[in-house]
């Protein structure tokens, strides 16, 4: 039974991969069509939105996509989830190191 299910899912996987390949090609063609200023504008805006969602507001990846970026679920989600999780882990590690620094009695702003 499991082999039959895996076999029947194979065309579905192939169709999904085909759609992903087409989307990747279209996205790359769109990016290549932008001039330097358009690329810079796109980069600036995405970085501002990521900073807001990840650093300033600290929301979930779903909140970032739906409320900050204003988009629905999309194929870029796995990439964004990975970045979101890496940023979260890095921020948590940084907070822990600040707590350790607080114990040394220094009176500076590095651990606020």
Image: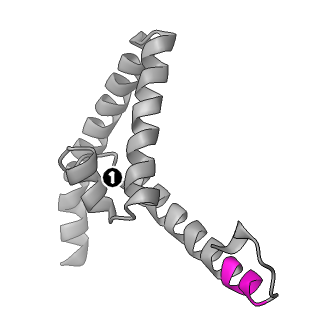
Percent x, y of residue 15: 22, 43
- Determine the residue positioned at 38% across, 44% down: 49
Q: Is residue 37 above or below residue 65?
A: above
Q: Can residue 27 be seen by looking at this rendering?
A: yes
Magenta stretch, residue numbers: 98-103
**Crowding near the residue tagged with mark 1, few <14, some 14–19, many ≥20 C-alpha atoms within 10 Å:** some
Q: Nearer the viewer, residue 10 or 109?
A: 109
Q: How is the image coloured?
A: one colour
- Determine the residue positioned at 76% across, 81% down: 101
Residue 44 lies left or right of residue 19; in this view the side is right
Locate the C terminus and report the quarter of the image it occupies: bottom right
Residue 43 lies left or right of residue 109; in this view the side is left
Q: Nearer the viewer, residue 51 or 82?
A: 51
Q: Is residue 67 above or below residue 45?
A: below
Magenta span dominant secondary structure: helix
- Determine the residue positioned at 42% across, 15% down: 38
- Point out the residue furthest to the front here: 107
Q: Circle 1 — which element? A: helix
Percent x, y of residue 93: 63, 75
**Is 51 within the magenta?**
no
Q: How many labels sit on residues?
A: 1
Q: Quadrant of residue 27?
A: top left
Percent x, y of residue 92: 56, 75
Locate the N terminus and report the quarter of the image it occupies: bottom left
Residue 45 lies left or right of residue 69; in this view the side is right
Q: Which residue is mark 1?
A: 77
Q: Can residue 13 be seen by looking at this rendering?
A: no
Percent x, y of residue 105: 80, 87
């Amino acid at each position: 039974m499991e082999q039959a299910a895996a076999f029947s899912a194979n065309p579905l996987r192939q169709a999904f991969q085909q759609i992903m390949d087409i989307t990747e090609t279209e996205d790359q063609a769109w990016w290549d069509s932008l001039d330097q200023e358009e690329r810079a504008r796109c980069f600036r805006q995405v970085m501002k939105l990521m900073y807001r969602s990840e650093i300033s507001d600290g929301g979930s990846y779903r909140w970032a996509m739906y409320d900050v970026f204003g988009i629905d679920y999309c194929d870029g989600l796995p990439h964004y989830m990975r970045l979101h999780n890496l940023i979260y882990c890095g921020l948590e590690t940084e907070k822990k190191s600040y707590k350790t620094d607080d114990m040394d009695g220094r009176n500076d702003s590095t651990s606020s």
